[in-house]
Image (cartoon, rainbow, N blue to C red):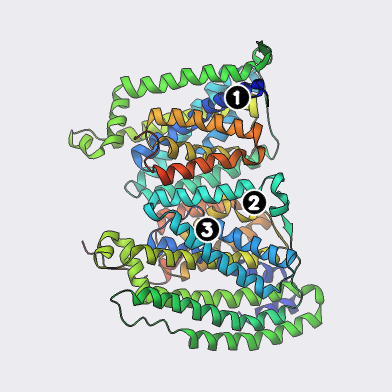
Amino acid sequence: MSLETLIVAIVDGIALGATLFMISSGLSLIFGLMGIVNFAHGSLFMLGAYIGYEVFSSTNSLALGLAAATASMSLLGGTIESGLLKRKSGDVLGQALITIGVMLLLDRTAWIIWGETTYKWVPDSLKGVIELGGIIFYEYRLFLIAFGAVIAAAVFSFLKYTNYGTIIRAAIEDREMVEALGIDVRKTFTITFILGSGLAGLGGAVLVPWLGVYPTLGITYLLYAFAIVVIGGIGSFTGTLAASLLVGVTQQLAAYYVPWLAEATIFILMLAVLLLRPEGLVRG
Amino acid sequence: MLTLPAIIHYTGFTRLTGILTSIFILSLYSLSFSILLGYLGLLNFGHALFFGLGGYTTAYALNYMGAPYMAAILASLLVGAISGIALSFIVRRVFHGVPFAFISLAVMLIVYFLYRKRELRLLSGGEQGINLVVPGSMKAVIFSETLVILGAFVVASSVVRAVIASRPLRRGSTAFAPLALAGVVAVLLANSWYIEELSLESPALRITPNYYFLSLNLLVLSYLFTKRLVESPVGRVWLAIRENEQRASALGFDVFKYKALAMAMAGSMAALAGSLYAPFTFNINPDKAFSPLVSVYAIIYSIIGGVWTPLGPILGTGFVVFLERLLADYTGKWSTIIVGAVFIAVMYAMPRGLAGLLEKAPRLRRGR
């Protein structure tokens, strides 16, 4: 249990947290804004990973794959919202149940197309390792941290500096007030879904070079994302970011030191937050 | 229903007995789920916890303690009820809606991920699970079932009475034991004869018809029990809590107690299903017991069937299991996709589920 192991575990945890942020920020916005527990979100994450893999391996370009995953999942997410969920607007439970049906459909379809195999692809430019002070870091995981920071900054500026972002934030805070100001909040729903789904797809694809993509990826990361949304506080950007890093680092530390607790720690954390501070670490 | 296995047996379509048996067992499970959702508005994402606990309790009792199967079932009922009450105490402060759903999910996932670990395989059998020692003589089981069921009814009705006694409601008409007894005796007489016949005919077929009758009996009894209960004053209070918790509480009802009662009932019924399912499929493992997919299936069965009447989840489970098994013959891998599509279609076309087609479900007048 040397210091090196600890540092590597923490760096890996931050890299994982960066990916987790991409899946959970969309989930948190959708939940905070529309009150929908979106079960299909993990499936979008996984499909993004599969599509990313297909494009990676055929074009050998990381950027193209990420773009394809983001674009296709945005489109799919937008379709789910405008095609299915819109017709049930007002019925939050019904909408959540419909996303369960969608999850089943998408997960099963992916399983039929890609089967049980784990697919992995690593870009040539980020294959190596970097040695810093005697500790070996994988280049790709460092890239993940940098990339995650860029994405987080982009989401932050969208929420902070654009019109839509302001409306979304305000509506999460107090929807009735926003509607009283004459703004049709429902118009932001589709945008939120497109944004959230795109981010999920991107997160899935960017994970492929590290952990690969396999059939249970969707449900596993959906559960992680649930935990993060609950821990961070529903609809809160800072909360989601902090919780993603917390969960990522906790998971990696546990995986290094007490492997049998690795996944369970996340949900113990989730349970503790629900019981002790039900509104989450940061009020949304 | 009672003559079916014999007919199937002589016509050779034995697979149907197995399908029907799993329908009965899974109906018990979805029935327990929809009591919570339909009558209390509690959406339990972690419902598989109870199912899995029942399965594992049975495995421990049969394999490690060599207990008779009936004792294993009893132990599962008890474990289910206790865990339902324990979960109620855990969620006491936020016993509603999304927080409840997430807390129960978190608890289930903690158990699930711990049970999957190789380090704890002594407890869980690892990812392979535990292969159960299948109980030998089932005839004895089905006979002693009478006693157990009656015992369970006495316990359950005294619990129900205890809850009612603390409330202004006077006549809790929960004396359903005579009705249940008559049913059990009739079913038992028929069953023991069939089982005798079938076991003589071909010993290989012994297991399935036994489970067929055992689970059919338990399903019928649980259905009667549930139906009786939801139509009793307790059920009325449940609906009142679903519709408006503050008002029910203001009227003097101890809301927590009523919710904990429902959790105990749902917990033990789901555990009962688990304790039938584990030996019926010869094995229990974490993915069959505690996985999120098992919870998702409770939702699918119940919603397709309709959760506002005890008949709904049974219809839903029958429909989905049949659809899935039969479709699997023709469409192979695509059967789950069709189930998912049916599920979404039901959400739009029949919000009250299959049961909504058959009857006007008892609806509480929505006063403001």
Q: Which mark is residue B287?
A: 2
**Which subunit holds the residue at mark 3?**
B
Q: CA distance from mark 1 to mark 3?
A: 37 Å
Q: Residues within 10 Å of mark 3 (few under 14, many from 20)?
A: many
Earlier along the polypeptide chain: callout 2 or callout 3? 2
Could you tell me the amino acid type at mark 2? Answer: Asp
CB atoms of marks 2 and 3 within 8 Å: no
Question: Which of the 4 image quadrants contains residue A37?
Answer: top left
Q: Which mark is residue B268?
A: none
For the question of whether residue B139 can be seen, the reply is yes
Query: Which residue lies under the disc numbered 3?
Result: B298
Q: Where is residue B139 shown, x and y percent of the image? A: 71, 81
Query: Which residue lies under the disc numbered 1?
Result: A12
Q: Residue furthest front?
A: A2
Q: Residue at x 50, y 74 (%)?
A: B223
Q: CA distance from mark 1 to mark 2?
A: 28 Å
Q: CA distance from mark 2 to mark 3?
A: 15 Å
Question: Which of the 4 image quadrants contains residue A116?
Answer: top right
Q: Residues within 10 Å of mark 2 (few under 14, many from 20)?
A: some
Judge left or right: residue B53 versus residue B239.
Answer: right
Could you tell me the amino acid type at mark 3? Answer: Ala
Q: Are marks 2 and 3 on the same chain?
A: yes
Q: Where is residue A96 shown, x and y percent of the image? A: 43, 47
Q: Residue furthest left?
A: A181
Q: Residues within 10 Å of mark 1 (few under 14, many from 20)?
A: many
Could you tell me the amino acid type at mark 1? Answer: Asp
**Which subunit holds the residue at mark 2?**
B
Q: Where is residue A270 shown, x and y percent of the image? A: 48, 42
